Each structure stands twice: as structure tokens, then as C-alpha cells.
Image: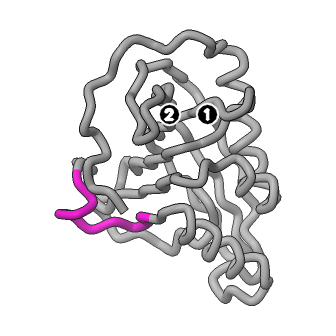
Amino acid sequence: MTTSLNATQLGPVPEGFDRSEIEQFLYREARHADENDYDAWEALWTDDALYWVPADMGGSDPARTMSIIYDNRSRISTRLKQVRTGRRYAQAPPSHLRRLISNIELLGGRENASGGTDLEVGANFIVIEARPRENRIWGGRTTYRLRRIDGTLKLAFKKVQLVDADKPIHTLSYLI
């Protein structure tokens, strides 16, 4: 896994990205995760994807700081295989989830390893998690990097910065 997550500066928003299409993609990604549609959620990712949830408020370098989640594409697949078994203790029974996404911003273009340009998008979120004995509210900001592959949007990077990442975290065994 790479540690140079921000090695290049953001450039202008690349051509060919429509705001409405981007919003619909983010809403669909959230719905797949909320409804435990793991096959559809996994299909949204690129082969070189990274999924990162920093365990601190800075969230600038996963090689130097603790992460709650720092998964490459292979680890994303492994995590989903574990959840699909239905025997993952922390998700038996599965959480009922709903996320709200707002303040969606097209932040700019960022060069990717294949020489193309990904669109970097930022958005605020709130996740409501209902469990048998309690409900929890998670909030924060997500940074996405979207890439068009054969005309289809794919998720190349997702960083979830929780507003309370510096406090003890209950299990995050569901997808955020």
C-alpha cells in the first residue's frame, strides 16, 4: 500500500465529469453499503483502490499514524468475504444503516499511477446505525477519488475522516 496518498497537488476538475452523475454515484455507493449489497458495493471499486479511515484528526499519513481501516483492493475483498459469511460476531445481527451525504464538492483532478486523472470529491456525511441495544450516530467528511473506466465511474480511493476519530471508537465492522 502506498503512503503517498497526496503526492500530487489538485489540478482543475477534469473534463467529462457531470455533477449530477457524481452525486448519483455517491448516493448509490452509500445505498449499497446501507443495504448490505456487498457484491454491488465491491463492484464499484478499481483494482488499485484504497479505503482509509484514519484513527486521528490529522489523517495525513497512514504510514506514520494509526488507522482504523487502511485496506487495499485485496483487503477490501477479504473484509467483504468475512461479512458475507453471516458469522461475523460484531455484525450478528447486521446493523441497520442509513447515511446522509451533503455538501458535495468537486475538488479537482489528481493524477493517478496509470497517468490519468481522477476526480477528487469531498462530502460530509452522517451515518445512523441501529443495533439491538442502541443507536449510534457517526459523522465526518469523506474524500473520494473517482475514475472513469470504459465509460463507467469507479471508486479508486475513499478516505473517511470521522469527527470523533480521536475518541474511543466502537466497532466499525460495517462499511462506512
Please report whichever mark, 2 or 1, sits nearer to the chain's N-terminal start.
1
Instruction: Residue 128: give x, y in percent of width and height.
Output: 64, 52
Name the residue at 46% across, 26% down. Answer: 117
43 and 90: which one is in front? 43
Classified by dominant secondary structure, the portion drawn in magenta counts as: loop
Is residue 164 rendered magenta in the image?
no
Residue 166 picture quarter: bottom left
Name the residue at 62% across, 12% down. Answer: 16
**In the shown orientation, is residue 9 left or right of residue 72?**
left
Q: Amino acid at mark 2?
A: Asn
The residue that mark 1 highlights is 101
Instruction: Residue 127: give x, y in percent of width and height.
Output: 61, 49
Name the residue at 72% across, 34% down. Answer: 27
**Looking at the image, can residue 121 be seen?**
no
**Looking at the image, can residue 68 be seen?**
yes
| Label 1 element class | strand
**In the shown orientation, is residue 55 left or right of residue 72?**
left
Instruction: Residue 22: give x, y in percent of width and height.
Output: 65, 24
**Mark 1 Cα shell of 10 Å, populated few (<14), some (14-19), many (≥20):** some
Whether residues under marks 2 and 1 lie with C-beta atoms below 8 angstroms apart, the answer is yes
Location of residue 127 with respect to 131 vertically, above or below: above
Is residue 68 rendered magenta in the image?
yes
Name the residue at 31% across, 46% down. Answer: 5
19 and 13: which one is in front? 13
**What span is colored magenta in the figure?**
61-70
Name the residue at the front extreme. 115
The residue that mark 2 highlights is 124
Location of residue 105 with respect to 166 vertically, above or below: above
Scheme by which the image is coloured: one colour
**Mark 2 Cα shell of 10 Å, populated few (<14), some (14-19), many (≥20):** some
**In the shown orientation, is residue 53 left or right of residue 151?**
left
Count how many numbered circles sit on residues in the image: 2
